[in-house]
Image (tube, helix red, strand yellow):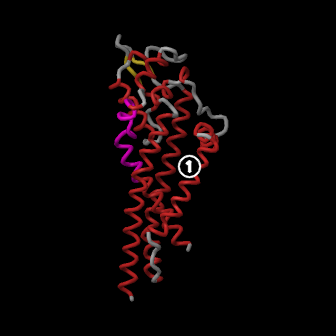
Amino acid sequence: MFTASALVLAVLVTSLWLSGLALRHLDYGYPVFYHLLDIEQTIEYYGSQNRFREGFEQTDAAQHRALFREIRMAIHDGGQGLDAIEYSLPDGRSVALLHEAEIIHLKSVARLFTGFDWLSWGLMLLLPLILWSRCAGGVPLASLRVVAPTLLLVAAGTTLLVFLLGPKRLFYLLHEWAFPAGEQWFFYYQDSLMTTLMQAPNLFGAIAVAWAVPSVLLFMLIYGACQRTVTWCVGGRA
């Protein structure tokens, strides 16, 4: 029972990590969501209202995509280079995109991603050991038909929780749990070009969906391969 639960967890985290890895190289779908969420209009409206920076409303879509890519790359590099990200104004001036509170927050986000990467690597390395344990014990894995209802129940419970608490409240709770006490993680659009650039939290919801769908497909493929491997191994021993 323990190895079965450990394997499901390992496959689930591995699926999430591999899906996220692919999304990273696609800038988390930002170029697509940029148009779907009309982020350019958000920037035009709130850029001129920013209390810390000027002229961001004069930047174009190509620069917005490039800035998001620079933030994404910095986050997955331990937060290195966040203070060097700049946008260019039509008159040739360069302006730092992020102020200190935004940089501190994004470095915390970078630490979370680094932790998730290490956890994922550990669980991926654990997978062969679990498979070997099941093969050595002659115990086959449950089929996807048995595992899927449990996962669907968890997904349904999570969805229900989102509706009960409300997406915004859940978003706030997760941030309160994930980040150090006293660290600023909520920014009004008028105080943060980062928030404006990402149309937070709307972009995060879109990314969550884009992350979840391929993760489910990967889970089915990886778990199915594990189940067939153990079945073949146990059958060969019989």
Magenta run includes residue 231: no
Magenta run includes residue 20: yes
Which region shows up in magenta?
A: 18-35
Vertical relation: 179 (above or below) 158 = above
Task: Please identify the quadrant where the N terminus is shown.
Answer: bottom right
Residue 34 percent location from the top left of the image: 39, 30
Vertical relation: 131 (above or below) 148 = below
Residue 40 percent location from the top left of the image: 40, 23
Residue located at (39% from left, 49% from top): 21
Residue located at (39% from left, 32% from top): 36
In the rendered image, which residue does mark 1 sit on? 159
Outermost residue toward the right?
181
Residue 218 percent location from the top left of the image: 39, 58
Q: Secondary structure at mark 1?
A: helix
Which residue is nearer to you in this view: 23 or 79?
23
Vertical relation: 25 (above or below) 100 = below
Q: Amino acid at mark 1?
A: Thr
Q: Which of the 4 quarters of the picture holds residue 26?
A: top left
Q: Which of the 4 quarters of the picture holds residue 227?
A: bottom left
Vertical relation: 36 (above or below) 231 = above
Outermost residue toward the bottom?
238
Residue located at (53% from left, 63% from top): 150
Q: Which of the 4 quarters of the picture holds residue 179?
A: top right
